[in-house]
């Protein structure tokens, strides 16, 4: 069976429904190092859909509405330098929920909560082999 998705998208793509989508997109770009690749607006001037590349993944963002209210979740974000990425996220308004440290499962990881309630586990893989319990 063929999987059909646009270039830059994985089989599963996070879709953020947030209040204050413009600010959230700014956080994704400035705080997490993303690149905005597409934008469409609603007639009322709110964001209908923005696509942001984070590494090799694309996420989507829309301004929440009554039928689709804001939803927070947790996301795992792999980066080249967990310490620098954590500092950048915090400098752009995120709050640390877990200090960066080396984890027993092979990642150097820390955690932040953004202003929209999402948790970001910011990680750098330290080992090449898969984790084995």
Image: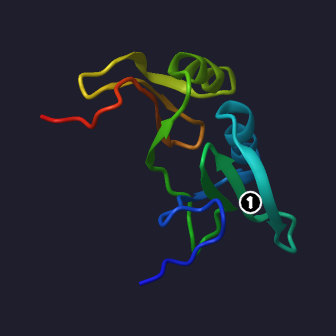
Residue at figure coordinates x 29%, y 33% from the top left: 129
Label 1: how many Cα within 10 Å (few below 14, some 14–19, many 20+): many
Report the residue marked by disc 1: 50
Residue 38 position (above or below residue 105): below
Q: Residue 113's x, y, as percent? A: 50, 33
Most distant residue in the front direction: 129
Along the horizontal axis of the image, is 34 left or right of 116? right
Q: Position of residue 123 (x, y in %)?
A: 45, 29
- Tell me which residue sits at (50%, 39%) in the image: 77
Residue that appears at 50% across and 57% down = 71
Q: Which residue is drawn at the image coordinates 71% and 58% (left, top)?
A: 51
SS at badge 1: strand
Nearer the observer, 73 or 37: 37
Where residue 131 sits: x, y (%)?
A: 23, 35
Q: Nearer the viewer, residue 14 or 108?
A: 108
Q: Is residue 98 above or below residue 4?
A: above
Question: Please, is residue 96 above or below residue 13 in the view?
Answer: above
Q: From this viewpoint, which residue is outermost toward the bottom?
A: 1
Q: How many marks are shown on the rendered structure? A: 1
The quadrant of the rendering that contains the C terminus is: top left
């Amino acid at each position: 069976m063929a999987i059909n998705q646009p270039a830059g998208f994985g089989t599963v793509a996070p879709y953020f429904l947030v209040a204050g989508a413009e600010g959230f997109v700014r956080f994704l770009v400035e705080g997490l190092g993303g690149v905005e690749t597409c934008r469409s607006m609603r007639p009322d001037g709110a964001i209908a859909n923005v696509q942001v590349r984070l590494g090799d993944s694309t996420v989507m963002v829309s301004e929440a509405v009554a039928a689709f209210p804001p939803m927070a979740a947790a996301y795992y974000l792999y980066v080249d330098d967990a310490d620098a990425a954590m500092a950048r996220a915090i400098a752009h308004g995120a709050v640390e929920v877990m200090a960066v440290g080396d984890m027993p499962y092979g990642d150097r990881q820390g955690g932040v909560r953004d202003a929209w309630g999402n948790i970001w586990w910011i990680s750098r893989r330290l080992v090449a082999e898969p984790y084995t319990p």
